[in-house]
Image (tube, grey):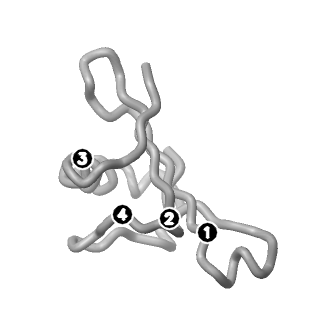
Amino acid sequence: MKVTPLTENLIPSFLDYFKTYAHQQDESFPLGENYARRDDEPAYLLKDNANNIAGAAVLMMHKEYIEAETARFRMFH
């Protein structure tokens, strides 16, 4: 297994993964169909030896969270 940053070409696979597993976690921060990488939302994928997504983490580091010295996960699976 390896961790890799989310890249533009991986977004479609990531959206499929999110749709499949979002119900297993807090769904307060869904991803839209037009999801795009953002500097204030670093995203990382856990990929297995067959290069399939086996996990994902998206950290929300928006200005209001930084000012409050906190952050939230959009996804942690």
Q: Amino acid at mark 3?
A: Leu
Which residue is under mark 2? 41
Q: Which residue is mark 4?
A: 37
Above or below, 42 against 3 in this view is below
Position of 28 relative to 47 (above/below): below
Residue 2 in the image: x percent, y percent? 44, 24
Q: Secondary structure at mark 1?
A: loop
Q: Quadrant of the N terminus?
A: top left
Q: Tell me the kind of residue under disc 1.
A: Met
- Relative image position of residue 30 (x, y in whole percent): 40, 70
- Mark 4 closeness class: few <14, some 14–19, many ≥20 residues within 10 Å: few
**What's under tag 4, amino acid-wise?**
Arg
Residue 48 in the image, given as x and y percentages of width and height: 35, 22
Q: Nearer the viewer, residue 41 or 48?
A: 41
Q: In the rendered view, does 21 fall on the left or right side of 62?
A: left
What's the distance in space between the residues labelled 3 and 1, CA to CA? 21 Å
Q: Are marks 2 and 4 in contact (CB under 8 Å)?
A: yes
Q: Residue furthest right?
A: 69
Tell me the kind of residue under disc 2: Glu
Q: Which mark is residue 61?
A: 1
In three-dimensional space, the C-alpha distance between marks 3 and 2, rounded to whole angstroms, equals 15 Å
Mark number, residue 10: 3
The answer to whether mark 1 and mark 2 are in CB contact below 8 A is yes
Q: CA distance from mark 1 to mark 2?
A: 6 Å
- Give the residue drawn at x 42%, y 43%: 5
